[in-house]
Amino acid sequence: MSPAGSRTGFRKRRKSGHGADSASDRLLLLIAAERAVRSILLIAAGIVAVVHLNADWGRTLSHLARDVGLDPRQNAIGHLISRAGALSAKKKAEYGAVAIAYGLLEGVEAYGLWRRRLWAEYLTIVATALLLIPEVDTLLKKVTVLKAAGFVLNLVIVIFLIIRVRRKGRRQGQG
């Protein structure tokens, strides 16, 4: 790739759709799609939290749980509902702002990964790796299948991207 090509963001694409690069690109697009979905959900949740500061989230979540067929009196669900209902308007605003900011970060990652940009791969490695630390802490307190699956998925994404970035570096060094 020429220096001018890297500044403009244009890059040569392989004509063949076969081999490890093709599989790696497909996996990268899958990660980008996952990040895009998370971005949309986080931004939407953040906006709802910020706009509805005085809403009774306990009652709202209780109704939502019933609507999807869950018993809101179950331990985990009941605990979540009671904690959400006890949040102050200030805490709702803080959580909403954090959700929006994190959603924007996920959106930037999604865009860059979809466009196969190296900077996005580095950003995703750093952002995801940093969040592995609190995930480990959460897992040490209480292991659930969902938490463990999320941790493993994020760990696999970080490892995949590190291998991909290193492979690109070797190819560019040989070219």
Image (cartoon, rainbow, N blue to C red):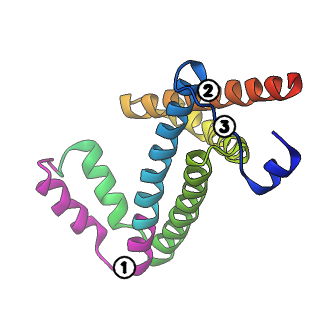
Q: Nearer the viewer, residue 163 or 76?
A: 163
- Relative to 127, residue 93 above or below: below
The secondary element bearing badge 1 is classed as: loop
> Residue tagged by mark 3?
129
> Residue tagged by mark 2?
160
Q: Nearer the viewer, residue 18 or 86?
A: 18
Residue stretch rendered in magenta on the structure: 45-71
- Mark 3 vs mark 2: which is more N-terminal? 3
What crowding class fits label 3: few (fewer than 14 Cα within 10 Å), some (14-19), or many (20 or more)?
Answer: some
- Relative to 136, residue 42 above or below: below
Identify the amino acid type marked 2.
Phe
Could you say which quadrant of the image residue 48 lies in? bottom left
Identify the amino acid type marked 3.
Ala
Of tags 3 and 1, the one toward the viewer is 3
Q: Overall secondary structure of the magenta stretch?
A: helix
Q: Is residue 132 magenta?
A: no
Q: Which mark is residue 138?
A: none
| Left or right relative to 3: residue 89 | left
Q: Are marks 3 and 1 in contact (CB under 8 Å)?
A: no
For the C terminus, which image quadrant?
Answer: top right
Q: Nearer the viewer, residue 155 or 67?
A: 155
Q: Which mark is residue 52?
A: 1
Q: Are marks 1 and 2 in contact (CB under 8 Å)?
A: no
Residue at the far front: name it.
15
| Left or right relative to 51: residue 31 | right
Q: CA distance from mark 1 to mark 2?
A: 39 Å
Q: Nearer the viewer, residue 3 or 80?
A: 3
| Left or right relative to 78: residue 54 | right
Where residue 24 appears, as percent x and y from the top left, is 57, 27
For the N terminus, which image quadrant?
Answer: top right
Identify the amino acid type marked 1.
His
The secondary element bearing badge 2 is classed as: helix
